[in-house]
Each structure stands twice: as C-alpha cells, then as structure tokens.
Amino acid sequence: MHRDFREETERKVEPAVTEAVKKRSMMEVEMIVNGVSRRLLVDPFESLLYTLRERLNLTGTKEGCDQGTCGACTVLLDDVPVLSCLTPVARCSSRRVTTIEGLAENGELHPVQKHMVETGGIQCGFCTPGMVMTAVAFLREKPRPDEREIREAISGNLCRCTGYAKIVEAISRAAEEMQS
Amino acid sequence: MKNDSPREEIAERSYVVVTTVEEAVARARELRGDYQYVAGGTDLEVHRRQELVAEHHVIDLTAIKELHAISIDGEELSIGALVTLDEIISDVVVRERVPLLATAARSVATPVIRKSATVGGNLLVKNRCTFYDQSGSWRSSIGSCLRDNGDICQVVGTDAGCYSRNVSDMAAAFIALGATIVVRDQKGEKRYDLTALYSGDGIRNHNLLENDGIILRVQVPIKPVASWYRKLRLRESLDFTSCTVAAAVDERNYIRVCINGVSMAPVLIEGDLAELSLEELHRRARRSCQTVDNDLLPLKYRREMIHIYLEEWWGSIHVDA
Ligand SMILES: Cc1cc2nc3c(=O)[nH]c(=O)nc-3n(C[C@H](O)[C@H](O)[C@H](O)COP(=O)(O)OP(=O)(O)OC[C@H]3O[C@@H](n4cnc5c(N)ncnc54)[C@H](O)[C@@H]3O)c2cc1C
Ligand code: SF4
Ligand code: FES
Ligand code: FES
C-alpha cells in the first residue's frame, strides 16, 4: 500500500502557484491516479512524469532521459502504456493513470512484479518500474507471448544492468502464472 | 479543464484540448501563430525538453474523433491524421492492402511510443541534426547554428543553408505509394500531393500549413504494388533513421522509390521500369540527396548505404520478374 499524499500535495502546491494562478498561467487538472481522484493546479506544459513525482510524490516512476529514449517513466493512461515524460499532464483530465505504486492489489504484488523479484530481473532497479508497466500492458494484449515478442515489447525500456535475460524470463514466467 | 476564455483573457501560456477541427482552427486564429498543434506529442515534447519550442500555447488535437478513423474511400484508403502507428500495424485492411505502411510504422521508435505517435505527427516530425537535437546547454557550448539563430551551420561551416535531415519513415512509405494529404486551414479544405508538404529547407521543413493548417487525413491508392522497405539505424530498437528506402512497383511497372533520412526532404525517384536502369537510379540519387555529416552514423557509410539499398531493391524486382 502506498501512502496517500493528497493532503501534503495540496498544502505544498498552493503557496507556490499563487503568483502563477494570478497570471492565469496555471490550469486545473482532475485525474484518477491509482484509483484516487486528484485535483491539481499544474503548469500547462508540465509532463505527467513531473506531476507524478514532484506534486504527487509518486517517485516509483523514474526519470531517466526525460526525452523518450529510455522507457523508465512508463505508466498506464487509461490502461495504455505511455511515456510520462512526453505526456503533457494537461491532456490527462478525466483520465485514469496507473503507476507502479498502483499495481499491487490487497498487498499482493502483480505477477510481473513478483517474478521480477524472484527471477533476479532487478539489479539497481532504476529501469524496473517502467519495465514492469510496459510488461503488464503487453501481457494484457498478448497473454501467451514467445521470447521474441517479449524482447520486442520491451525494446524501448533500456536496462543498463541485467542484460535483459532475467527480465525476459520474469515476464515469461508471469505470463505462465497468469494463464494458470 | 477550462478553456472557454475569449481572446482578451487568453493566459500567457495555455494548453487546450479541442474536440473539433473548427474549434482547433478558430483557436489557432486567435493565437496568431503563437501556438503549436500537438497530437501524440512524441516529437513536440522532446523539442520542449530541449528548449526548442518558443510558442506559448498548445492546441491538443487528440480528442477530435473524426481524425482517428481508417476507412476505404472508393479506390483509396483514407487514414485519419490521429491514427496511431500502433493502429496502423494492427489494422487488418492496412496489413492486407498496403503492407508497406505497416512495415514502415513498425520501424518507427518503440512499441510504447507507437501507441501515442500518430500518422500526422510522423509526417510532420521535425528534421534532425546531431548538432541541433540536443539540450540547450549542449547547443550553447558549441555556439548555436543557423537553425538556432546562429551565424553558421556547424556541419558545413558556412551560412549557405541548413542541411538537417527529414527523418519521417512514414513519409517515405506514403510517398512511394503515391499518397495525398487533405489539409484544412483558414481558407477551407484542400488536397495535395504529399511531396508538396516538404519544403527542402532545413530550417522551415514544411509547406502548406502556414494558414493554421491541420492535416486531416492521408489518402493512399489501393492497388496491387510490389513494395520493399529498408531502414538503417544505429540501434534497431529505437533510433531515428540514418537512411530509409521505400519502393513500390505497380501493375503497369511504374516505380516510385523514396529515400529519406539523408537529405532535407524525402527524395522521390520515379519512372517506367522499362526506361530506368540501376545506373540511372544511382545517378538520380547522387544528384538529389544532399547528405552531410550530421547523423550518428558516418557520412561515407550512409552515402554508401543509399546505393546498396537501391541495388538490393533493384535485384529483388528483377529476381521476381
Ligand atoms: C525515442 C524516439 C524515437 C523515435 N524514432 C522515430 C523513428 O524511428 N522514425 C520517425 O519517423 N520518428 C521517430 N520519432 C519521432 C516521433 O515519435 C514520430 O515521428 C511520431 O510519429 C510523431 O507523431 P506525434 O503524433 O507524436 O507528433 P507530435 O509530437 O504530436 O507532433 C509533431 C509535429 O506535428 C504537428 N502536428 C501533429 N499532428 C498534426 C496535424 N494533424 N496537423 C497539423 N500539425 C500536426 C505538431 O504541431 C508538431 O509540430 C521518435 C521519437 C522518439 C522519442
Ligand atoms: S545542418 Fe547545420 S544549420 Fe542545420 S541544424 Fe545542423 S548544424 Fe544547424
Ligand atoms: S524518462 Fe521518459 S523515456 Fe526516459
Ligand atoms: S536493473 Fe539497473 S537499469 Fe535495469
């Protein structure tokens, strides 16, 4: 279970934005993040990644390159995987965002998370949240993938530690478990 | 999101999600050029991170439903500008009738990016150059270039022009297939040959959209063609093209070969197969491609690969015949 930072966030945001709001250059966004409705004042050009990490303190989602080339920031927007660094938060109004913090249910890790841990698909862990979110969305689309398909699915998620073999194995095992 | 402000109340900076083309064009008129349209955002947002977007307003087109459709329109396939590359890959009609488009789409970026990246955005992807597509601090450390309000081009060292490369893989495929685009602007709706979109200017890459133009759809003739596609890039998984060649031969043996990633605009070579030779193809490619050293892969190698791909393709159609 992750902490609900809503109150803290609202306290944190308000004084900082007063000036900008006066100039009308902040905007209101209401979205459902990991099942919780959030109403926020945001900069019109800020990324969903920034909002998640800096306003909602959901720091599980990682910032690697901030330019679309590493996949570390992958989250689900209405169940579709997106790079949160390239997704303007302004387009997320009335939409559902799922981050790595929102995957576990009733204290149980998602099978992809579980097998990443058990298989050793995690070393430094920086790529892991993005990798897991990509894999979760992929397995919904393709529940019985072969190795080549798994490799292609995660080809935009760079890992500097593992050499990918254990990650592919973890996703494959998760697929098997989800089928049984 | 509240976006009902009249002109005098427009914020210093704004992001508005519109739901109709009319609304988009009306909003654009109010903003008098100080805006960018956005679709998937996978190109525009990268430029924003690199401090290359000066405009203060964004008009988000993604909620315009009519631009999301793929349909057969007489002898043509009509592809809405907001169709994503992922949808192109999985669309049965596209895969069966114009497989070249699915192959090209699959070669763009990564599977996750392709779920946001649109066809219209791809046709309008900004030209690339290793000296320009960098962070603000990187660019200022070498002194800015012509495209970045500087005095000279960092690649060729003169002020003669910018040689940034058009890198749209979908443009190569669509042009090989003889596609047209439908543009809506302040004056109305009009159809153009896709090649007319590309200016050949490294700084202002595109024509036709000066009047707040929006690409509504791409129309592709559905006819039997033998198609072929190759893309050279450093990392197969996610790099932009260093050289893309897309080719199509129709039932009357008319060929259209489009080479992209090596010049300021896609290069089209076309003609009757009977009247062309491999030497002629090489000669036209050499004459038309203004390739300079502004990519991750070395210049000599890229230049060679243009001709290797042409040779490979030529060999393939002659084997088939
Ligand atoms: C890591 C990475 C790898 C990439 N690799 C490739 C690659 O291999 N090949 C490639 O071609 N691209 C690549 N791209 C660039 C980009 O992802 C694609 O070109 C994509 O298709 C752009 O579409 P978009 O909808 O995201 O465009 P956006 O970013 O939304 O828009 C791009 C431009 O088009 C304008 N625009 C968009 N739609 C319209 C419309 N309907 N009418 C008028 N103007 C419009 C916008 O104002 C903007 O200037 C890559 C990007 C990243 C981050
Ligand atoms: S080709 Fe020259 S002017 Fe153009 S972007 Fe590159 S360095 Fe700048
Ligand atoms: S931080 Fe988004 S892709 Fe790297
Ligand atoms: S585990 Fe370290 S980057 Fe993947």
Image: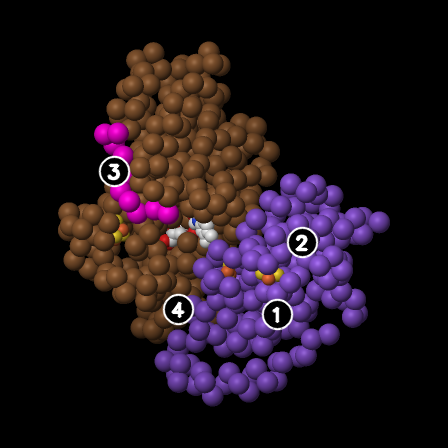
The residue that disc 1 covers is A60
User: In the rendered image of this protein, does residue A172 appear above or below residue A111?
Assistant: above
Q: Say which of marks 2 and 4 sits in front.
A: 2
What is the distance, in whole Å, between disc 2 and disc 4 at their CAs?
41 Å
Q: Amino acid at mark 3?
A: Gln
- Which of the 4 image quarters holds residue B270? top left
Mark 2 vs mark 4: same chain? no
What is the distance, in whole Å, between disc 1 and disc 3 at their CAs?
46 Å
Q: Amino acid at mark 1?
A: Gly
Q: Tell me if residue B141 can be seen.
A: yes
Residue B49 lies, in percent from the top left, at 40, 64
The residue that disc 3 covers is B290
Q: Residues within 10 Å of mark 4 (few under 14, many from 20)?
A: many
Q: Over which residues does the magenta segment extend?
A: B286-296
What number is the disc on residue A167? 2
* Colour in which the image shows chain A: purple
Side of A117 relative to B306 (left or right): right
Which sits in the foreground, A22 or A158?
A158
Mark 2 Cβ inside 8 Å of ligand 4: yes
Q: Secondary structure at mark 2?
A: helix
Q: Please, which chain is the residue tagged with disc 1 on?
A: A
Residue B232 lies, in percent from the top left, at 43, 38
Mark 3 Cβ inside 8 Å of ligand 2: no
Q: Residues within 10 Å of mark 3 (few under 14, many from 20)?
A: some
What number is the disc on residue B182? none
Residue A105 lies, in percent from the top left, at 76, 66
Side of A50 relative to B159 (left or right): right
Residue B193 lies, in percent from the top left, at 33, 34
Q: Tell me if residue B187 can be seen.
A: no
Q: Please, which chain is the residue tagged with disc 3 on?
A: B
* Colour in which the image shows chain B: brown
